[in-house]
Amino acid sequence: MNHEAYKLPPLGWAWIRDLMHDPNSPILDFYPLEFEQDFNGKKQDWEAIIKIPFIDEQRLLQAMKSREHRLTPEECCRNGFGTSTKFIFSPGESTVYPSLLPDFFLPIYCCTCKMEFFDLPTLDGLHLVPGLCLGVCLGVCLSAKALAGFPLWVEDIAQEMVGKRTFIGWPFLQEGLVTAVSDSLFKYEKLVLVPGTLAKVVSNAYSHQSLSHWKGKAEWIEILYSKRCGVITDDLDVLVHVRPLQGLKRLESGALVKNYKGPEKELEPAIQMVLDAPPLSEEFPDGTNIFFLGKHAYGVAAQVSSTTDSALSVVLAFFVSDKMENNKFKIIVDSRVSQHYLPSFKAASTIGMSPRALSKIMSSFMVPSDHQKNNLGLSVSL
């Protein structure tokens, strides 16, 4: 801090102000009169970095302790620990909260908050149990099958995750579909081996070249999380192959389904950075108000009545007035005078002209006359 900075603190700091400028101050060297400036490409003095000595914490505390006798009782109380206060919303009758600095701030006339003293809880009389709580699972915990200290096999992880949706890209989460799980030796996928049977997890061994490629990729991902996201993932033993969500597409039946990107857009995050998707019953509890996006009632208000693992049952909200308005609109449309419409090439064929000549006449057709151009076109868009 600059030597002249002792003028900045308010009067409440007068008890230590002389430490910044008194020639006999034990920490006067903390406030040099001359110092170097590191412009680091800047031009103005105020843009430079001031190079001053580092503060010795012990010397600073000792110097301040020698001035504590100058403090008033109020200032000593301010520098100590006080009581904890809890502010609670009170929906009852509002009160007037007086201003602590009337010259600067007005009172709060409609205060709906009450203040109570709060005692922080202590551990007196409680028995501290060292170790993990009952039911804690270490490592990757899927369906609560992992025992503390015993990690799951990668094949079990693939059985739980492949084919299900998940969320990647922390901290900006994006939904995706898990297609495979891999470690340093195998890639685990779900395949139907016999038609008509359920898909089973199949492990495919890596070649020697692919093996070194997987290890290099895992090291790069670990460094990326550490440097860019500030996340220490430790060693990466398992990667998850995820296809990000691209959007929604409508089927011939009118249903909207999620469309995931192709294999060329597949991402491979670490399993530590993958979040399991919550069940539909948690995302859409019974009674949740939603908008229906189906083909026959697009945009209609609806309410969730029940959920399964993969579908919602909803109750659509139809109003009698909507049906009456639709019927009136149909009557107005049917009562309009029908006009026969011909495309441009049909109209040209009917009158025996080429489509290009007809388009010229119907738009802008400039004809020179008496040293000027006259537009003989009809200026009508076909």
Image (tube, grey):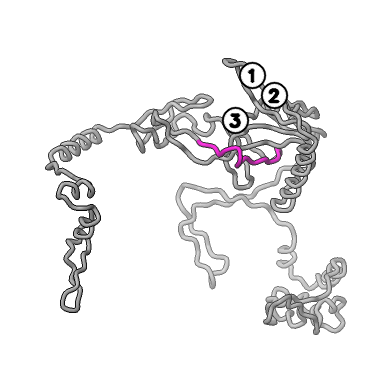
> Would you say 144 lies left or right of 109 here?
right
Viewer-nearest residue: 326 or 186: 186
For badge 1, the amino acid type reads Leu
- Compared with residue 117, is residue 15 higher up or lower down, i.e. above or below? below
Residue for point 77% across, 82% down: 3
Residue assigned mark 1 = 193
Residue tagged by mark 2? 202
Q: Amino acid at mark 2?
A: Val
Q: Are marks 1 and 2 in contact (CB under 8 Å)?
A: yes
At x 19%, y 79%, the residue is 371
Q: Amino acid at mark 3?
A: Lys
Mark 3 or mark 2, whichever is nearer to me: 2
Q: CA distance from mark 3 to mark 2?
A: 16 Å
What crowding class fits label 1: few (fewer than 14 Cα within 10 Å), some (14-19), or many (20 or more)? few
Q: CA distance from mark 1 to mark 2?
A: 9 Å
Which percent across, then down, holds residue 336? 13, 42
